[in-house]
Image (cartoon, rainbow, N blue to C red):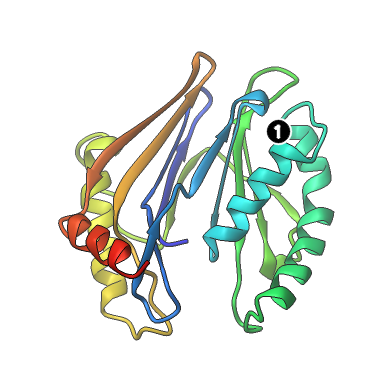
Amino acid sequence: MSSLIFYTDSEQILVATDTLAVDPDGSPMMFSSKAIYLPHLRTIVAGTGIAMFSGDWAMQANNRMVLGGILNLDYHASAILRERWIRYRSEFSLPDDLTTTIYHFGLSEDDSSVCAFAYRSTNDFVSERLPYGFGLKPVCNLPEQGTLIENLPIMMEEQRKQEAGKSKSERLYIGGECIALHLTKEGCRTFSVFKFEDYLDDLQAIFLSH
């Protein structure tokens, strides 16, 4: 996973990610949706570290688990994520220092209240209830003026510039398109906020490599 920016309060959830996935050498590999909404659970699943891991977890919750909602999912998540991470690291020969965090954002099946959880591999995927507010991965400045939607291009460009200055082994690759999901009691709206300036170059490189 590269960029993840989210905001929650008592009435709403906004989750924004980029769409660029890269090969181990940093070359564009594909565009993908890195935050996935499960309507029957009224829950958004996202992650940092490895986009495939969070995507596969969302599909497990969708296809192979009988659940009542985000709280029911939270009850099962830690144990299943631990076991899946062990298998995942073995199957893909992942280095020991590679980490991942899974995020759930949704509306409680009990009272429709907004709630969010994090499960970090560095903390053995223990369930952490998140308070209302912002989450910025990687960390960047939060502009004082304008709405979050208006500021997403500024924030993601800042994240990308910060990461571009790091070595290939340390950096996160941010690009493609910024996709946002806005969840309220009325439903979930998904929309494109903007495309990075090199979107077409990355798209061409992706198709040429396949």
Q: Residue at x 79, y 41 (%)?
A: 64
Residue 89 in view, yes or no: yes
Residue 77's place in the image compared with 97, above or below, is above
* Residue at x 50% of width, y 13% of height: 186
> From the viewer's perspective, is 89 left or right of 13?
right
Q: Residue furthest top?
A: 186
Q: Is residue 122 above or below residue 76?
A: below
Q: Which part of the image, by quadrant, shows the C terminus?
A: bottom left
Residue sitting at 83 percent across and 45 percent down?
76
Q: Residues within 10 Å of mark 1 (few under 14, many from 20)?
A: many
Disc 1 is placed on an element classified as helix
Q: Residue 134's x, y, as percent?
A: 44, 45
Quadrant of res 126: bottom right
Residue 204: % across, % down: 23, 61
Say which of 198 and 111 sits in front.
198
Q: Is residue 34 left or right of residue 125?
A: left
Tell me: 169 left or right of 123: left
Q: Which residue is mark 1?
A: 70
Quadrant in which residue 206 is drawn: bottom left
Determine the residue located farthest toward the left in the rendered image: 197
* Residue 22 % position (x, y): 40, 69
Residue 190: give x, y in percent of width and height: 40, 30
123 or 36, which is in the foreground? 36
Relative height, residue 181 to residue 139 (above, below): above
The residue sitting at 57% across, 59% down in the picture is 52
Which amino acid type is marked by label 1? Ile
